[in-house]
Image (cartoon, grey):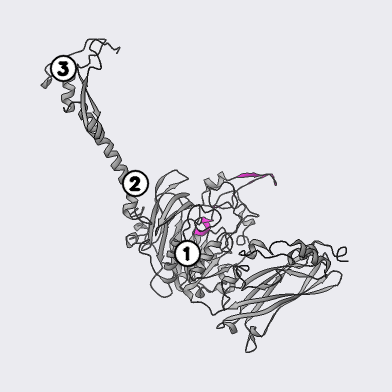
């Protein structure tokens, strides 16, 4: 019966996954259920009992490294929900539905009869064909805010087939609880404002990578930024991911919001709330941009063979026109430059590839530059690429750090070393108000507001349909928690004014940043020494050739002109008379300069003039 009546795609997937053997030192997102064991799968087929099931078969979120990243960080009260997706398989029928999903806790999941963990569910309306999904969002309740230890239980739901057969599915659960960490150790990663291919054409961040033109990794802290996540956890930070717009975020819980390589647009309410959170609630920002240049975007146009239509990039590496809207309340902006450079800090070096530069920055911020080549104009000069700024000294004033390239944090297309040390310095500043004086010396502090004299503010490209892929743009799209931001005042009420007549057109000292003054000036100093040495060598050689005479005396001796110009010896027409002896300079052994005479040219030789 199992081989005939229930031989369905769902049944085959069940036996293959149930019989699979986990691969050591690999997590679930790398290997799935593991290595297929055909002998065990065949044994499961012979003893098969028709039943709906879920993948993975258990949710032991303490099992490392298999359940990475869940096992690397405990759950705690007030954190963003822990989200787990289950694949539901139903071999009993091609169509079915999920009924009554619930979380049942064991005795260790209660404190004084109050549950320590709650769950929310979303699932497929119809299981078709043979399968669907069940998403589980786990939260620690207020009763568990001071609890430490392991909580166990099971996720239970029923699957009703279209032939009225009912299956009960149980997925064991284990979860580690801990008290909430201090605010200065809590980071929030913004995932809501990241867009990727498919289905829109969002181009790669590193233009030097020609084999992978689409940004399909999602810029998630658990995918192409996995190395960064592991580094931050090793440094003692707790990283949470927010999948909603900023109106739903309680800013008082977090020290820093990480906004890395975003492509999405922003609600006006989000921008107002974020500015209010930074100026009055102590939230800090680390913003990492990317390139956005219309001329460069037009060069990435290509003909898609599947749709027989021309594809245009919806944004650059990041959506800088929209990101600059977020930075405007702080008098900051990125430019439309596309830069390549080599960075160095604390004994480490890395590439700055297809990054942008900082176009404007407020007074008292520390802004520094690096010698870089602009791919747009071909110009090689100093560009500001990183800056730090504090909105004030009051307890509610946050801090902001900008950087212009995410490739050194991205593990997929990074060429060379990472820039985790630089990010650590930025987080020390935003989370704990500690300034790394080696990277950000006081000499880099701006005496007036800065506005770059090279490049422009980036603008959106015409002819694209960004609203088709955006979760923000469109008449029917509103912030998810609009009621929570109804009382926020206008941005201008807490944004300090700026004196535009006092703006610096260029950096006061371009020899700043990751290189000290001697290192930055070294290429030009070396070039000057080389040119000067060449000129001196030519001068010495010429002096030896003229026999120790100065140039006017040598000319006079060869042309017959006497002092005062009284007598001039004129050559006969048709020939040039050479001197009897021509002094020749020659380098001898040991670097000693010798001199010899030769009759290299005879007097009788005539030359046509």
What x and y, as percent, mark residue 161? 83, 70
Label 1 to label 3: alpha-carbon separation: 78 Å
Q: Earlier in the sequence, mark 1 or mark 3?
A: 1
Q: Which residue is mark 2?
A: 523
Please tell me in which quadrant of the rendered image residue 548 appears.
top left
Sequence order check: which comes first, mark 2 or mark 3?
2
Image coords of residue 484 (percent x, y): 57, 74
Q: Residue at x 40, y 58 (%)?
A: 345
Marks 1 and 2 sit apart, C-alpha to C-alpha, by: 32 Å
Q: For numbered disc 1, what is the local secondary structure? A: strand
Please name the residue that numbered disc 3 is placed on: 560
Q: Secondary structure at mark 2?
A: helix
Q: Nearer the viewer, residue 103 or 585?
A: 585
Q: Is residue 455 left or right of residue 215?
A: left
Residues 562 and 226: in front is 226
The quadrant of the image that shows the C terminus is top left
**Badge 3: how crowded within 10 Å, few (<14), some, or many (20+)?**
some
Region of the chain picked out in magenta, as a range: 301-323
């Amino acid at each position: 019966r199992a081989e005939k009546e229930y031989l369905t795609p769902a049944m085959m997937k069940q036996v293959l996954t149930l019989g699979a053997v986990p691969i050591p030192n690999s997590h679930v997102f790398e290997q799935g259920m593991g290595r297929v064991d055909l002998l065990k799968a065949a044994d499961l087929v012979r003893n098969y009992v028709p039943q709906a099931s879920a993948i993975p078969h258990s949710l032991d979120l303490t099992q490392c490294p298999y359940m990475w990243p869940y096992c690397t960080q405990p759950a705690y009260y007030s954190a963003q929900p822990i989200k787990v997706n289950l694949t539901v398989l139903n071999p009993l029928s091609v169509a079915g539905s999920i009924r009554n999903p619930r979380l049942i806790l064991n005795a260790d999941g209660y404190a004084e009869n109050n549950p320590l963990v709650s769950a929310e569910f979303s699932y497929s309306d119809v299981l078709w064909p043979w399968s669907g999904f069940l998403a589980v969002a786990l939260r620690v309740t207020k009763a568990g805010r001071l609890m430490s230890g392991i909580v166990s239980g099971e996720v239970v739901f029923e699957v009703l087939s279209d032939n009225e057969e009912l299956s009960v599915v149980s997925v064991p659960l284990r979860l580690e609880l801990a008290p909430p960490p201090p605010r200065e150790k809590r980071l929030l990663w913004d995932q809501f404002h990241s867009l990727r291919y498919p289905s829109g054409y969002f181009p790669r961040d590193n233009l030097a990578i020609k084999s992978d033109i689409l940004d399909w990794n999602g810029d998630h802290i658990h995918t192409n930024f996995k190395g960064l996540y592991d580094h931050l956890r090793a440094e003692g930070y707790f990283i949470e991911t927010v999948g909603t717009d900023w109106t739903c975020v309680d800013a008082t819980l977090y020290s820093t919001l990480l906004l890395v390589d975003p492509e999405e647009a922003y609600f006006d309410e989000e921008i107002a709330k974020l500015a209010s959170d930074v100026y009055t609630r102590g939230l800090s920002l680390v913003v990492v941009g990317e390139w956005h240049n219309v001329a460069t975007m037009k060069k990435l146009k290509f003909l898609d063979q599947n749709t027989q239509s021309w594809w245009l990039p919806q944004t650059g590496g990041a959506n800088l026109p929209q990101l600059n809207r977020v930075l405007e309340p702080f008098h900051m902006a990125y430019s439309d430059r596309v830069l390549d450079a080599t960075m160095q800090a604390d004994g480490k070096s890395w590439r700055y590839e297809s990054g942008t530069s900082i176009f404007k920055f407020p007074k008292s911020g520390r802004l520094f530059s690096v010698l870089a080549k602009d791919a747009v104009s071909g110009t090689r000069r100093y560009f500001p690429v990183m800056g730090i700024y504090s909105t004030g000294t009051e307890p509610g004033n946050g801090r902001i750090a900008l950087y212009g390239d995410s490739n050194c944090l991205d593990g997929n297309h990074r060429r060379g070393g990472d820039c985790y040390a630089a990010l650590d310095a930025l987080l020390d500043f935003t989370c704990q108000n500690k300034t790394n004086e080696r990277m950000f010396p006081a000499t880099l502090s701006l005496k007036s507001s800065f506005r770059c004299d090279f490049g422009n503010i980036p603008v959106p490209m015409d002819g694209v349909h960004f609203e088709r892929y955006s979760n923000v743009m469109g008449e029917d799209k509103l912030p998810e928690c609009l009621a929570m931001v109804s009382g926020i005042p206008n941005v201008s009420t807490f944004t300090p004014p700026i004196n535009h007549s006092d703006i610096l057109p260029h950096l006061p000292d371009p020899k700043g940043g990751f290189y000290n003054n001697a290192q930055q000036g070294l290429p030009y100093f070396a070039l000057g020494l080389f040119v000067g040495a060449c000129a001196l060598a030519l001068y010495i050689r010429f002096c030896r050739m003229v026999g120790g005479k100065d140039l006017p005396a040598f000319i006079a001796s060869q042309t017959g002109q006497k002092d005062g110009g009284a007598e001039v010896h004129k050559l006969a027409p048709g020939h040039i008379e050479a001197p009897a002896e021509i002094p020749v300079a020659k380098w001898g052994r040991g670097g000693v300069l010798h001199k010899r005479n030769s009759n290299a040219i005879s007097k009788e030789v005539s030359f046509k003039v």
